[in-house]
Amino acid sequence: MTATATPPANPAAPHPTPPSPSPVKQQPAVLGFFSDTWLIFTRQLRLSLRNPAWVIIGLIQPILYLAFFGPLLSKIAKGGILGVPANNPYSFFVPGLLIQLGLFGAAFVGFTIISDWRAGVIERFRVTPVSRMALLAGRVLRDVLTLTVQAIVLVLAGLAFGMRAPIGGVLVGLGFVALVAVSLSAVSYAVGLLLKSEDALAPLLNMVMVPLMLLSGIMLPLTLGPHWLRGIAKATPFGYIINAMRDAFAGHYFNAIMVEGICVAVGLAIVCLWLASRAFIKENA
Amino acid sequence: MPIIEANGLARTFASRKRKVEAVRGVDLTVDSGEIVGFLGPNGAGKTTTLRMLTTLLRPTAGTATVAGCDLLKDPLGVRQRIGYVPQAIGVTAGGTDPNCTVSEELAIQGRAYRLSAADTAARANLLTNQLDLTGLEPRLCKTLSGGQRRRLDIALGLIHSPSLVFMDEPTTGLDPQSRSNLWEHITDLRDKLGTTIFLTTHYLEEADALCDRVLVIDHGKIIAEGVPDELKRQISGDVVTLSVTGDSAQAKTILAEYPGVREISLDGRAIRMTVEHGEEALPGMLRALDAHDITLASIQLARPTLDDVFLTLTGRSLRDDSPSANGHGQTEADDQTKIEDEELAGAGRSGRS
């Protein structure tokens, strides 16, 4: 049985009519999505810049990778093994680091959405007319921007270490980094929003990301590995992307490897964005 | 004219292990310009109902019209027309980012409702004045006091001058002074602008002081509704406690037959009863005792509280499980989130594998 609640015949006090309520302005949905994305993007970017410590750490990190891991690889390259070009080892090594940056820089953004959710910020915006997709897209865009800046720093540091690569190849490589960032940051936000717990997110990310990184061949080429290992690696996306990036850094743009890499990177980004947007749109996240 | 009309609104949280009916068919009507309080213990379904009415949670059954828009068919229309002040206790806070400044939060909120920059600035200025936030604009939200931050939450919910505002536990966690201060602001909203306010609370004083009408919810159903004073009179009656010098048992028998006496119990020498229109019944009751040579030792007449109403309706006291009573501040949202988490974590895992 449900009680029907009806208001009393005469309300407690006479109420004046509200002066022209809610100046609601309609605008086309697509336009709304882009302006909302920009709104969220600028807010998130301002919040990132407000914490300069993280900006600085983010910029120093790629240089440290290069300084601490690069010398090991140059030694190996001098021995003429692993297919690393002996005269230009950094053009092999930097693309790997770029992907690693993309993988780990973007995958852990899910933590920030948990604290946003806890602050009530997500709910607050979900009740406004702001596109729920834009809550995701604005954040992803901020991550793409910060990772691209970090990637540029890494490439510049690589040049300082003696890497030689054509400018076109570097730009293609940055494009791949951006696509990887889109994919992983979108998924990370969605998973963070679903789990709502740092304690659950951290082991999950480590469990997924470390094998993906090892199987991508960014550390050591997978051609070294046994047949079964290469078989598993074929089923993961990042190997295709890293191969295409290395080709781009070597100046080879028009071949099957590049087509494969682009298809995988774009396809991955689309699938990840689609999955993540479902989590953001659903009416009980 | 009703601004909220809900029929059979229900929400079931399903996980693999169990099925929880958080809200089981709520019918309610709220008129324009009313302040309506949704009163109930933790876990009764207050927040779940509010989240359904504000498009945050899709009902599993039922229909509703909110601010002239169909809740299920036009959720965006609902969002454009309502204001929402989220709960600020339990797992989630009131909606401000600790590292944003007060003016940034007000500005983005205005833009989120598609106000022009000039309109947003004008509204922000007006609201900071009205809600005593003047001078705090450049401060980061994390540096505000609890009361200031709550008033900012409310300012954000009002930025687009909505005619209907939902407030989830607006004063929970505030000191008594901040609380009564907020009550004034909320009453002003209705008196000066005719804003309709739908709020949840488990503070009886709040429902009494603030609300034109209360809906009492328990176990996901509305069990009573009305003007607070009427509810108390209809459901509880006045509580009369008296003790006599003579034979208490005989006094009890005499009083039990007195018209208007509903419940009567004897506890030691004290006779406790609920009486309709207690103050009018008292003189007659005393004469009846006098006629049997029973002398009165003490007498006390207490007005019923909304807690008495709740006690009469459910056999339980609202105060038993208020956060201040158990000292943990655990809320209904906690329970609900746990259930949702279970469900969603399951979905997340299966999605990844």
Image (spheres, rainbow, N blue to C red):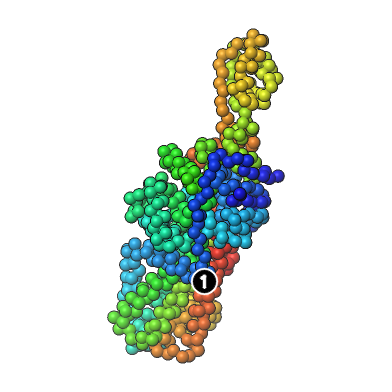
Chain identifier of the residue bearing label 1 in the image: A
Residue in the foreground of this view, choosing between A149 and B69: B69
Residue in the foreground of this view, choosing between A267 and B11: B11
Q: Residue at x 35, y 77 (%)?
A: A152
Q: Is residue B202 above or below residue B234?
A: below
Q: Quadrant of residue A173?
A: bottom left
Residue in the foreground of this view, choosing between B291 and A256: B291
Across and down, in percent, residue A101 comes to 40, 73
Q: Residue at x 56, y 23 (%)?
A: B301
Name the kind of residue labelled 1 in the image: Val
The reply to whether residue A117 is visible in this rendering is no
Q: Residue at x 52, y 46 (%)?
A: A16
- The residue beneath circle 1 is A30
Question: Judging from the image, what secondary structure is the residue with disc 1 in?
Answer: helix
Q: Residue at x 41, y 69 (%)?
A: A142
The reply to whether residue A168 is visible in this rendering is yes
Across and down, in percent, residue A158 comes to 32, 80
Q: Is residue B202 above or below residue A264?
A: above
Across and down, in percent, residue B118 comes to 39, 61
User: Few, some or many C-alpha atoms within 10 Å of disc 1 (few <14, some 14-19, many ≥20)?
Assistant: few
